[in-house]
Image (spheres, rainbow, N blue to C red):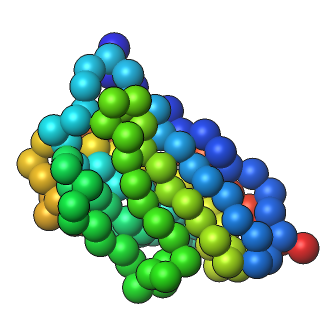
Amino acid sequence: QVQLVESGGGLVQPGGSLRLSCLASGRTFSSYAMGWFRQAPGKEREFVAAINWSADALYYADSVKGRFTISRDRAKNTLYLQMNSLNPEDTAVYYCAADQRGLGAVRRGSGLDYWGQGTQVTVSS
């Protein structure tokens, strides 16, 4: 069974940091583009960051650029999101996703091959 499982979420104070992980199992995702999305209460899901299969192309939403870093370890089948300088507007459920069509498809965020179940990130004092 193919699964994407996120971890690393939690409660953090404004200005703090968290590192999210997304472990892929059931198949290798080394040829897939992958990404992070988030959904805050009452809002639509939004794109956060994406990375291509070889990790030499990265894209970020303007709202997280300079604060978040996406990376992947193909040998470990794991995707990461390092989040720094967090603020309350970053509070959301964070999801990872993967798609064989490539970076453009992940950035669009619709009809992706695989999604994780999400991990909650809460930024509050």
Q: Residue at coordinates 79% horizontally, 77% vertically from top-left? A: 14
Give the quarter of the image for residue 58: bottom left
Q: Residue at coordinates 42% horizontally, 60% vertically from top-left? A: 70
Question: Can residue 111 be seen at all in this image of the molecule?
Answer: no
Q: Residue furthest left?
A: 101
Give the quarter of the image for residue 37: bottom left
Q: Residue at coordinates 40% horizontally, 30% vertically from top-left? A: 76
Screen quadrant of the C terminus: bottom right
Q: Residue furthest bottom?
A: 62
Identify whether 85 is placed above or below 47.
below
Residue 44 locus on image (x, y percent) = 45, 68
Q: How many marks?
A: 0
Give the quarter of the image for residue 36: bottom left
Identify whether 98 is placed above or below 4.
below
Residue 88 locus on image (x, y percent) = 72, 77
Residue toward you, 44 or 65: 65
Question: Can residue 28 be seen at all in this image of the molecule?
Answer: yes
Q: Residue at coordinates 42% horizontally, 68% vertically from top-left? A: 48
Screen quadrant of the N terminus: top left
Residue toward you, 28 or 87: 28
Residue 57 locus on image (x, y percent) = 21, 65
Identify whether 11 is placed above or below 27.
below
Residue toward you, 52 or 4: 52
Q: Seen in the image, is 22 located left or right of residue 87?
A: left
Q: Seen in the image, is 58 located left or right of residue 123?
A: left
